[in-house]
């Protein structure tokens, strides 16, 4: 049974070859996946065109259900975007090395899920064509957005987060892009030449690189926390029972990390399977991810209980009524399913046997994500269905238009991701090499280490590795 | 602009496009598909408007509402030649500034897209558009001595013209049919009080007990009663309202004490209450004849409970209220009247009035209309029974139908449709194609009440009698429509009747008629001044010959109750303020406005008690099958505690088969399955007497009811205080 | 836009926050609804449809909850103040509650609109700028009374087929799809009333402005007026029932006085006072 994160004896050249191979020669399966994603997007586009032409009516949104799946799915995707930050920024700072083979795709996920999430507030607008009004652009009539509105904060938070995480992804990729540049021909070479920003891997570049990477990591963490806190403010700042909850920011952040981790497990298994990344995305790394997920799942469960409890002792009859309705009302099956997926299923992660069994983990991760998606829906919809005004109580089920757009958003995310894995290295080559390198530092004999270094002027153990000539 | 080479033509095109935007977005009535140049004749010129058109300013003109027979006085807001809004006429003692929802909705009747714009003539099986001359030639030719006039409520100078026309033609057959009427009550009032429509003094009454008279919703003059009720009866010392009815109406929903009795036993309940008053409260029974006292004596508490199904405490409670809150008014209305023993029920209620000494105190003479020939002609449901009988005898060669839709509103069992088909020639004067006018040989399109001149006199008038003046609020929407007055006048002229040749149109006739009004009415004004004043205020107060009434106690008989095991339920085809008898079902606002009590919109429904629902095993929105010996209807149920457990109430007004895009195919028509029972003494249709059986169909559908919860769920939304608290803080001289 | 304007606006805004509200109101339009008089007849609602160009959405859309009833008549069967409703029959009738926008002074809808399409006017009104609205619908979610309605479709073709469109009131617009709308206290009538007063060179008097609902009520259950006008009927009613703006709980010398504001405990500070329904016990 493999216990080490990664086999320390992988040759650097093999690492390069394996990763670069994954970027080449898309096979039939890849194109099928792309086709499937395009189809899903086509569904959503058709639904959106219909909705754009006719109005928000076909979505089944109504009085009082002014928000539904669009906002729920928006929150879901925003939550998803926390995976990359967690893995690359938080784990980077705390020096958890095992993150290295898997953080790249997690970061890509962050960026793409933000690109997906960002679509939803736009799609859900009644008058999409005026969406830029939420931004404080300079208008000669002196009209500003309403800075008191959490939706405006959202716009700021998401755009900032998107910019930063995209930048973070890009910066972290520069050394690898240089490798690609050196191995590519044709349009790819041109692309990588531009993107690698003249990376030569010299000492000065590495120093700057480390500095800026650390800086970005530190910058990104509070940003990630604030983004989801602000998204939670969309609800928490309102006076609706069930939304007006002070624990929402941590609850949302925990949920976000949770769904992010779950999604990492899913993609981890997929990448490992399709790109034969068995040597990098190893079982021990999966196990560690699973353990992390389990811990977050327990935090999330705890925060859920806190929410029930604080509603219980708040003596707010309306909030209590809502809580009770969540337990027993028309949406109760989904509520219980959410609790099952979010709080019971993760116990599968507590067992080593299950953690090491990829198919099980794949199913579990999907269930966790389903649970997290349901969580968002269960936050948005039951609150609207019950409110202070009993005359406006209503039960609403989303229409095909909403489902199609939600469905399509997965296609959109998938398409972006598929393009990413074929254009950019989805495993960080230089950092895997670091892992191999660092392991070797602890290797038993200096001699073996010496032997493994191919050139005499290679950095000595403890010094910076170089990718030059790799 | 010098730099831009936009020529005049382009500019106008742009303006035309702008007009499209403006028309769709701001509701301007600019033509939507033509440029200004093409459509110039439709555009009001702001540079040289008519002298009375002030662009951008709405002007209010007085007129009279024709949406129901109550005759409220209205102001219509006219802007740029279109009528936009109606409001109550503050000068009117009838309705004041207030109006009911149907009055507002008149606008959508007037502008209804289904309105007839051209005469229709039957060619083969189909009604086809024809010129007015062609249609008119047919009408002139076919109307003769054996012509029947089937109308709704008709009053004012139109009634005068109709009378003259009948005289000329030698036809005495005219049938004024209203499905919502007070025929039984009027007959009884006439017999007991000597006046069909006495004046009810809500301002003087301290308590009101209504046996099925939905006076806030559909009974006699609802807006007037609502105004009196809220502003005089419910303020200050605040009277007590008790309502006995099988299904909660708007009046019932406002009651302090709402009691459902078995349908048809309202009389027994009244007698039971009288019994309590006589024996428990020692009310002086000498005002009643011995015969009546004997009947009352039979209705002990136990017996009354047995017959009516009303708890004895409730009976005592009502008697107590009546005794302690004197004087009172006892009213009775359709759900008590429209039974085989309807007149008995009415008589028993009236007996209570007499016993309590209300006659003369809270029930006063309403005086007599000084200008007699234009007074309201009483309308009833007996008219349609008579009509059917007369057609059956073959007495009728031609019929002119206007203002009524008996094919829809009369019980199907009467066979109005068949009988009409036996009449060789049928003319319908109507704004719309409805079930009745669709059967006609000639349909003449009527002008709406906002396009036409007229006068009307309401049957119920509170004190001073008033002639409501109806003046056009705008140009006719369609050139080939005519008002009823004009049609009648043309007929008179074509028959060469003396004295009519000189009138160009109904307007000219009215001017003359106004000039000829008695001096007492004109009050010394010149003709012109009188006419102007009439138009300005929209009503002419003609005063009333004061009268007094004295009661002659009616005969009452014992009222029993017979259960029917085959058909255990009573079908209550309740009237709904909004759709009225179905005539407003083609008005989108009236369809979209939920029913006041059940909050159901755009559909029919059946109201049943939770007990009944349990027994049937149905939930809200489930379909039930209601079967009488005349037929079957299926509709969704609404379950609440405002209906007697033995009753299934389906409001009338829906279920149109041919009444334009908004009404056709919406809901079901309970009138279709009524048994053709009539009140034994007056012959009025007993629409509440039908027994039915009810079964679950198993079908379910979302229920079109507005609102989620019907409970306040513990929030303070509608606070309620007791009347005693109210009397303490705001009663008496307390001025808020 | 100038920096000066921006700074001025900002300090104005800051001042409003520090002083706990904006006090330079020209008017404070308010209402009283007497539930003792209201019979639930719905005339106000239809009058509102007629005055304010409200679209008829049809059965299916009404059932979906996409109707546009600015003034809705709520009807409840229970009476929380008078004990349970476990009787066999609905003996004391129903409870009717006409609900129009409560024109809250601390409106929850105003803060959440991302583009400030809804804001407080110096008239004390909670105004909705249709042109500015982008349709995020947050305001409606955050209205505890659920009195904001959304145009889920474009209705001007379906709702007003020729010639029904001729009835449309040119004083205000027909709203297109994607826009939130709600009761405006008949702002066009307020405009007309103010213009008239200005033309006549006087202040607006009580009775110059009457909303469509108040005007058409056959029972005169609705009183409308300016709460800053001491002589206005509406002000007198608020005084006599000891209801004041700016409170979440009223201090009344006599607890039996009927005035209350719906859900005032939420600190929305509505400008509509209701008077308790009255029933014999």
Image (tube, coloured by chain):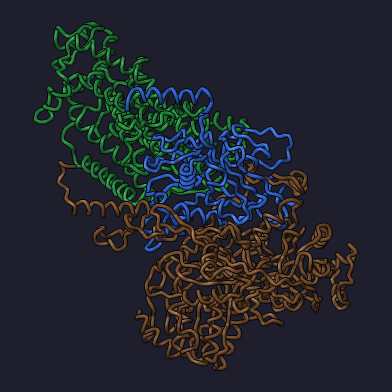
A183 left or right of B135?
left
For this rendering, which residue is in front, C136 or B533? B533
Residue C102 locus on image (x, y percent): 54, 42
- Classify the position of the N terminus of chain C by image quarter: top left
Residue C149 locus on image (x, y percent): 46, 47
Quadrant of the image occupied by residue B263 = bottom right
**Residue positioned most to the left:** A186
- Whether residue B650 is visible: no
The letter of the blue chain is: C
Quadrant of the image occupied by residue B52 = bottom left
| Image hue for chain A | green
The letter of the brown chain is: B
Q: Residue at x 26, y 12 (%)?
A: A440
Residue A273 locus on image (x, y percent): 28, 34
Q: Residue at x 71, y 82 (%)?
A: B680
Q: Is residue C141 above or below residue C91?
A: above
Residue C278 locus on image (x, y percent): 71, 49
For this rendering, which residue is in front, B422 or B69? B69
């Amino acid at each position: 049974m493999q216990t080490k994160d990664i086999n320390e004896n992988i040759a650097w050249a093999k690492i390069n070859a394996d990763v670069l191979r994954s970027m080449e020669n898309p096979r039939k399966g890849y194109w099928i996946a792309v086709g499937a994603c395009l189809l899903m997007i086509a569904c959503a586009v058709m639904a959106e065109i219909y909705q754009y032409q006719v109005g928000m009516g076909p979505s089944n949104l109504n009085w009082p259900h002014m928000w539904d799946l669009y906002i729920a799915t928006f929150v879901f995707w925003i939550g998803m975007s926390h995976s990359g930050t967690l893995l690359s920024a938080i784990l980077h700072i705390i020096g958890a090395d095992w993150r290295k083979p898997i953080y790249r795709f997690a970061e890509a996920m962050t960026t793409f899920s933000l690109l997906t999430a960002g679509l939803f507030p736009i799609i859900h607008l009644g008058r999409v064509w005026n969406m830029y009004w939420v931004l404080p652009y300079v208008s000669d009539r002196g009209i500003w957005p309403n800075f008191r509105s959490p939706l405006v904060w959202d716009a700021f938070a998401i755009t900032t987060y998107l910019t930063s995480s995209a930048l973070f992804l890009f910066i972290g990729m520069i050394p690898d892009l240089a490798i690609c540049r050196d191995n590519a021909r044709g349009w790819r070479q041109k692309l990588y030449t531009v993107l690698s920003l003249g990376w030569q891997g010299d000492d000065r570049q590495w120093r700057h690189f480390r500095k800026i990477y650390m800086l970005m990591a530190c910058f990104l963490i509070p940003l990630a926390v604030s983004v989801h806190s602000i998204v939670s403010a969309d609800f928490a700042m309102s006076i609706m029972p069930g939304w007006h909850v002070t624990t929402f920011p941590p609850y949302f952040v925990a949920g976000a990390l949770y769904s992010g981790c779950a999604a990492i497990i899913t993609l981890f298994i997929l990448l490992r399977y399709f790109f034969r990344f068995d040597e990098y995305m190893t079982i021990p790394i999966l196990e560690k991810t699973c353990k992390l997920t389990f811990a977050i799942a327990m935090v999330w469960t705890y925060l859920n209980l806190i929410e029930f409890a604080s509603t219980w002792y708040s003596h707010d009859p309306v909030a209590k009524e809502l809580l009770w309705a969540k337990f027993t009302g028309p949406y109760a099956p989904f509520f219980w399913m959410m609790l099952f997926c979010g709080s019971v299923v993760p116990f599968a992660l507590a067992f080593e046997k299950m953690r090491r069994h990829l198919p099980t983990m794949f199913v579990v991760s999907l269930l966790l994500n389903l649970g997290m998606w349901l969580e968002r829906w269960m936050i948005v919809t039951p609150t609207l269905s019950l409110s202070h005004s009993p005359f406006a109580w209503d039960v609403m089920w989303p229409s095909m238009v909403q489902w199609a757009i939600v469905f399509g958003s997965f296609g959109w995310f998938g398409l972006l991701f598929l393009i990413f894995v074929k254009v950019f290295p989805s495993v960080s080559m230089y950092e895997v090499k670091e892992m191999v390198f660092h392991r070797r530092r602890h290797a038993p004999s200096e001699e073996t280490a010496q032997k493994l270094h191919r050139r005499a002027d290679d950095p000595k153990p403890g010094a910076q590795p170089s990718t030059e000539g790799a | 602009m010098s730099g831009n080479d936009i020529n005049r033509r382009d500019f106008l095109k742009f303006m035309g496009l702008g007009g499209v935007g403006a028309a769709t977005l701001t509701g301007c009535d600019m033509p939507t598909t033509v440029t200004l140049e093409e459509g110039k004749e439709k555009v009001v010129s702001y540079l040289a408007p008519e002298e009375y058109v002030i662009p951008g300013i709405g002007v209010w003109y007085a007129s009279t509402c024709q949406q129901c027979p109550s005759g409220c006085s209205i102001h219509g807001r006219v802007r740029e030649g279109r009528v936009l809004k109606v409001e109550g006429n503050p000068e009117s003692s009838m309705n004041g500034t207030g109006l009911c929802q149907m009055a507002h909705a008149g606008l959508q009747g007037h502008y209804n897209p289904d309105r007839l714009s051209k005469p229709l003539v039957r060619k083969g099986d189909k009604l086809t558009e024809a010129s007015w001359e062609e249609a008119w030639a047919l009408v002139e030719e076919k109307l003769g001595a054996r012509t029947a006039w089937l109308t709704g409520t008709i009053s004012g100078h139109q009634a005068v013209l109709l009378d003259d026309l009948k005289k000329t033609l030698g036809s005495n057959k005219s049938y004024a049919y209203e499905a919502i009427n007070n025929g039984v009550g009027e007959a009884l009032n006439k017999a007991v009080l000597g006046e069909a429509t006495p004046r009810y003094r809500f301002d003087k009454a301290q308590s009101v007990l209504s046996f099925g008279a939905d006076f806030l919703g559909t009974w006699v003059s609802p807006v007037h009663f609502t105004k009196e009720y809220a502003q005089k009866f419910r303020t200050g010392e605040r009277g007590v309202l008790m309502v006995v009815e099988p299904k909660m109406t708007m009046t019932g929903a406002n009651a302090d004490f709402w009691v459902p009795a078995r349908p048809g036993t309202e009389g027994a309940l009244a007698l039971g209450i009288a019994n309590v008053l006589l024996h428990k409260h020692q009310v002086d029974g000498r005002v009643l004849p011995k015969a009546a006292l004997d009947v009352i004596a039979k209705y002990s508490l136990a017996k009354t409970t047995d017959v009516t199904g009303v708890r004895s405490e409730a009976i005592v409670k009502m008697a107590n209220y009546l005794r302690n809150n004197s004087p009172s008014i006892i009213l009775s209305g359709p759900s008590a009247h429209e039974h085989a023993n309807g007149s008995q029920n009415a008589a028993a209620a009236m007996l209570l009035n007499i016993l309590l000494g209300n006659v003369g105190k809270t029930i006063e003479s309403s005086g007599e209309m000084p200008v007699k020939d234009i007074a309201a002609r009483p309308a009833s449901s007996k008219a349609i029974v008579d009509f059917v009988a007369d057609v059956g005898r073959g007495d009728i060669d031609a019929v002119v139908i206007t203002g009524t839709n008996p094919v829809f509103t009369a019980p199907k069992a009467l066979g109005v449709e068949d009988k009409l088909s036996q009449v060789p020639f049928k003319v319908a004067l109507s704004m719309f194609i409805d079930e009745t006018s669709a059967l006609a040989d000639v349909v003449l399109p009527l002008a709406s009440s906002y396009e036409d001149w007229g006068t009307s006199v309401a049957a119920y008038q509170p004190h001073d009698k008033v002639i409501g003046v109806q003046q056009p609020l705008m140009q006719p929407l369609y050139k080939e429509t005519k008002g009823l007055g004009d049609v009648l006048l043309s007929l008179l002229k074509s028959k060469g009747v003396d004295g009519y040749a000189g009138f160009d149109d109904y307007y000219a006739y009215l001017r003359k008629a106004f000039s000829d009004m008695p001096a007492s009415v004109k009050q010394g004004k010149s003709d012109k001044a009188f006419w102007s004043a009439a138009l300005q205020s929209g009503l002419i107060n003609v005063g009333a010959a004061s009268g007094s009434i004295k009661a002659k106690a009616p005969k009452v008989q014992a009222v029993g109750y017979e259960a029917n095991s085959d058909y255990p339920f009573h079908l209550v085809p309740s009237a709904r303020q909004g759709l009225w008898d179905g005539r407003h079902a083609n008005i989108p606002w009236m369809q979209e406005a939920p029913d006041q009590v059940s909050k159901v919109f755009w559909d029919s429904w059946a109201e049943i008690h939770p007990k009944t629902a349990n027994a049937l095993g149905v939930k809200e929105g489930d379909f039930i099958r209601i079967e009488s010996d005349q037929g079957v209807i299926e509709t969704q149920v609404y379950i609440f505690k405002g209906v007697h457990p033995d009753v299934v109430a389906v409001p009338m007004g829906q279920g149109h088969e041919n009444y334009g895009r908004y009404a056709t195919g919406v809901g079901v028509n309970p009138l279709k399955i009524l048994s053709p029972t009539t009140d034994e003494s007056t012959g009025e249709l007993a629409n509440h007497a039908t027994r039915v059986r009810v079964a679950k169909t198993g079908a379910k559908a979302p229920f079109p009811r507005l609102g989620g919860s019907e409970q306040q769920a513990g929030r303070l939304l509608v606070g309620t205080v007791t009347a005693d608290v109210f009397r303490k803080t705001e009663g008496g001289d307390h001025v808020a | 836009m100038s920096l000066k304007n921006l700074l001025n606006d900002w300090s104005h805004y800051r001042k409003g926050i520090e002083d706990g509200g904006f006090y330079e109101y020209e008017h404070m339009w308010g209402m009283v609804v007497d539930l003792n008089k209201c019979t639930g007849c719905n005339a106000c609602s239809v009058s509102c449809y007629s005055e304010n160009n409200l679209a008829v959405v049809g059965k299916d859309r009404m059932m979906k909850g996409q109707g546009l009833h600015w003034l809705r008549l709520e009807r409840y069967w229970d009476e929380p103040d008078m004990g349970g409703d476990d009787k066999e029959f609905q003996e004391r009738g129903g409870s009717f509650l006409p609900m129009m926008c409560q024109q809250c002074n601390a409106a929850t809808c105003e803060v959440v609109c991302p583009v400030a399409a809804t804001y407080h006017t110096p008239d004390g009104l909670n105004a909705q700028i249709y042109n500015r609205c982008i349709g995020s619908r947050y305001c409606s979610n955050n209205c505890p009374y659920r009195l904001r309605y959304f145009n889920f479709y474009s209705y001007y073709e379906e709702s007003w087929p020729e010639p029904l469109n001729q009835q449309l009131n040119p004083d205000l617009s027909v709203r297109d799809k994607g826009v939130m709308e709600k009761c405006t206290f008949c702002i066009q009538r307020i405009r007309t009333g103010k213009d008239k007063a200005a033309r006549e060179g006087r202040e607006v008097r009580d009775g110059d402005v009457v909303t469509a609902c108040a005007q058409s009520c056959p029972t005169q259950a609705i009183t409308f007026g300016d709460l800053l006008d001491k002589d206005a009927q509406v002000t007198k009613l608020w005084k006599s029932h000891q209801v004041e703006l700016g409170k979440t709980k009223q201090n009344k010398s006599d607890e039996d006085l009927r005035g209350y504001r719906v859900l005032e405990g939420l600190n929305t500070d509505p400008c509509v006072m209701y008077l308790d329904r009255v029933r014999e016990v």
